Image (cartoon, rainbow, N blue to C red):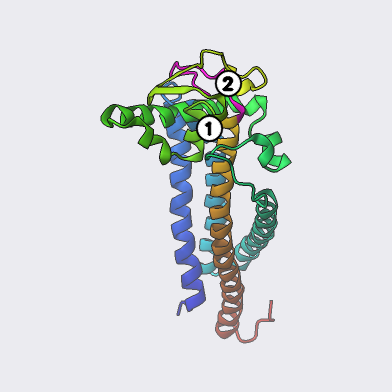
Amino acid sequence: MIRLSNTVVGALNILSLLIGLAAVGTSAYIHVHGGAASDCQKVLRYPLLIGGIFVVLVSTLAIVGSMWRVNVALYMYLFVTFLLIVWLVLFTIFALFVTNNRKVGRNGEYRVTDFSHWLQRYVVNDKNWDEVKSCLMDGHVCHNLALKGGRNNNDSLIFKHLSTTQSGCCKPPAYCGYTMKNATYWEVPKTGPPANKSDCTIWNNKQDKLCYDCNSCKGGVLANIRNQWKHLIVFNVCVLVLVTTIYVLGCYAIRNNRLESLSQNPRAPNP
């Protein structure tokens, strides 16, 4: 008779096996259609492939160990699961440290210096920013704003409900003093942009330029990442509880395998 813990471990890992196969398939799709994929999508190719293969291998160990009573496979699975639990705890603590800055932007606008040094160094450095810009353009962050402006007679209303990314990347900073003509065009003051404000001189009304290279755009992206990471922390805690529960069930599955082996071979030594 298959015991409950073995069944639960097997069922959960069949589900994770399917998720892992889906990740590998998505990575293969991006690779085959590389010409049509954006730079933002290409960034996901290798993480999806590596993560998918890892999940498939670990899930296979759990399924073999729990459903076919192979304790060696279960021991390997529990070892990897324990490392995953440790990693989740460390990553959650790290995420709390990275998002602990509580500065709020003025007029919905942020600066790079409002955020932790790690986010500044590894997210918006010169090497990574071109990929981030590609993602923003591929997501039509500012193009969608322009479409809304075309359907709205009062363009100023659009800018009252912008995301942090749109506020930083799709319009010049408020301190520049630019005059909005419509949702897609801003006029420079007759006196010219402030000389000591680089973002004001970087701004360009061309839709593929706008303020994508502005410090305010990088700050808006970082604010969005910080908000997402806060949600990720909650998600990680839930995953941590789930993985810990599966780990405990895996321990019971090993115990069940031992008891069943003893019941079938009462004279056999306890492994």
Compared with residue 163, is residue 84 higher up or lower down, i.e. above or below? below
For the point 57% across and 42% down, which residue is it? 223
Look at the image and say whether residue 210 sits in the magenta stretch.
Answer: yes
Q: Residues within 10 Å of mark 2 (few under 14, many from 20)?
A: many
> Disc 1 designates what residue?
168
Label 1 or label 2, whichever comes before in sequence order: 1
Q: Which mark is residue 200?
A: 2
Q: In the figure, is residue 214 to the left or right of 4?
A: right
Q: Which residues are magenta?
A: 202-215
Q: Position of residue 113 (x, y in %)?
A: 69, 37
Look at the image and say whether residue 58 sits in the magenta stretch.
Answer: no
Mark 2, secondary structure of its residue:
helix
Q: Residues within 10 Å of mark 1 (few under 14, many from 20)?
A: many
* Residue 222 at least partly seen: yes
Compared with residue 66, is residue 226 higher up or lower down, i.e. above or below? above
Q: Position of residue 241 (x, y in %)?
A: 57, 67
For the point 53% across and 57% down, which residue is it? 59
- Residue closer to the observer: 29 or 58: 29
Q: Residue furthest right?
A: 117
